[in-house]
Image (cartoon, helix red, strand yellow):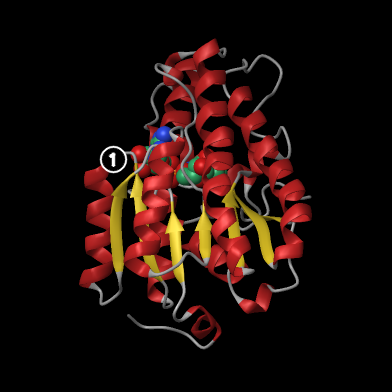
Amino acid sequence: MASSAMSDQLQGMVAAVTGAGRGIGRGIALVLASRGPAVSVSDIDSEAAASVAGEIEAAGGRAVASEVDVTDVGSIQTWADSTISELGKIDICVPNAGVIGAAKFNERKDYNSDDWRLTWGINVQGMVNTTDVIAPHMKERRSGKIVNIASHGGRAPRGVAEPGRGTVQIPYAVSKAAAIQFTHLLAIELGQYNINVNAVCPGRLWTPMWEAIALNHKALNPDLAELSAKEIFDRNIKATMPLGREQTPEDIGKAVAFLASEDAAQITGQALNVNGGAILN
Ligand SMILES: NC(=O)c1ccc[n+]([C@@H]2O[C@H](COP(=O)([O-])OP(=O)(O)OC[C@H]3O[C@@H](n4cnc5c(N)ncnc54)[C@H](O)[C@@H]3O)[C@@H](O)[C@H]2O)c1
């Protein structure tokens, strides 16, 4: 695959990405692979993971695919062990798997206990499970880059809550705030092992996740009844992003690649917004 000068730094590395069967995780896997690393692609959807690994291989990169449920520590351990045995090591760990909410999220104004259980279980505990399994390997090697995928929704209420909007997005935003704080705190502990821990906070991307949010806006706002989910998304982007355009999975992948590179050697414990300026720190 083609590579650029900056990303030659990533040559010879091995990256492990969760939730990489589609959307942002797929974009991260493809960008990393294009810059040198072999990629261990995992997802709860094994066919999707295999398809992304196939794309990487077809483009001349190296990839393996695994079915992994990040709520199941045993499944992450099996994946990490097989990645290390097949690819030799893990240099870059990207806990990306995430969910917006539980069943019928699209239709509800307010959260239920399943929204809390799922967003906490996957977005927070799943991230913790992934780093718990992979960090010991990095500690032993005294080298590693962990790049958590959080959200700018974990930083500020804009776009998540407004008077009368309902509470359905609150569990997700709280889980992402926890992901950011987990990133800060883990960085303090792992710095002594030469492990950098950072987060990328994506803004808004047209993936199945944001389609669910747009459908939720449509269900709750009669003014949006005539618009498609994509039109609602486009309006939201124009109204909220100073740069006036949505982010792509590749935009997020490029930020991950930077944080995984030696150019970012002195950056740890940070959460980097990649959001077109929609929410400022
Ligand atoms: N789309 C956005 O606008 C946006 C914005 C900010 C942050 N994010 C974050 O980016 C990440 C990816 O989001 P996306 O938009 O690509 O979502 P998506 O729904 O398109 O993809 C999520 C992927 O995670 C996988 N997954 C779900 N549960 C899993 C589990 N238990 N174990 C392993 N894999 C599982 C799914 O199968 C899917 O492939 C998430 O953490 C999300 O919160 C997305």
Q: Does the rendering let one see residue 207?
A: no
Q: Position of residue 205 (x, y in %)?
A: 48, 47
Q: Does the rendering let one see residue 260?
A: yes
The residue carrying mark 1 has its beta carbon less than 8 Å from ligand 1: yes
Q: Is residue 266 left or right of residue 171?
A: right
Residue 165 found in image quarter: top right
Q: Work out whether 58 lies above or below 75.
A: below
Query: Residue at image x 42%, y 68%?
Result: 31
Question: Mark 1 falls on what kind of element?
Answer: loop
Query: Residue at image x 52%, y 45%?
Result: 130
Residue 141 found in image quarter: bottom right
Q: Work out whether 149 lies above or below 157.
A: below
Query: Residue at image x 24%, y 70%?
Result: 57
Q: Position of residue 112 (x, y in %)?
A: 54, 11
Q: Work out whether 251 lies above or below 119.
A: below
Q: Give the quadrant of ligand 1.
A: top left
Please identify the quadrant where the N terminus is shown: bottom left
Q: Which of 12 and 270 lies nearest the eye of the viewer?
A: 12
The residue pinned by badge 1 equals: 45
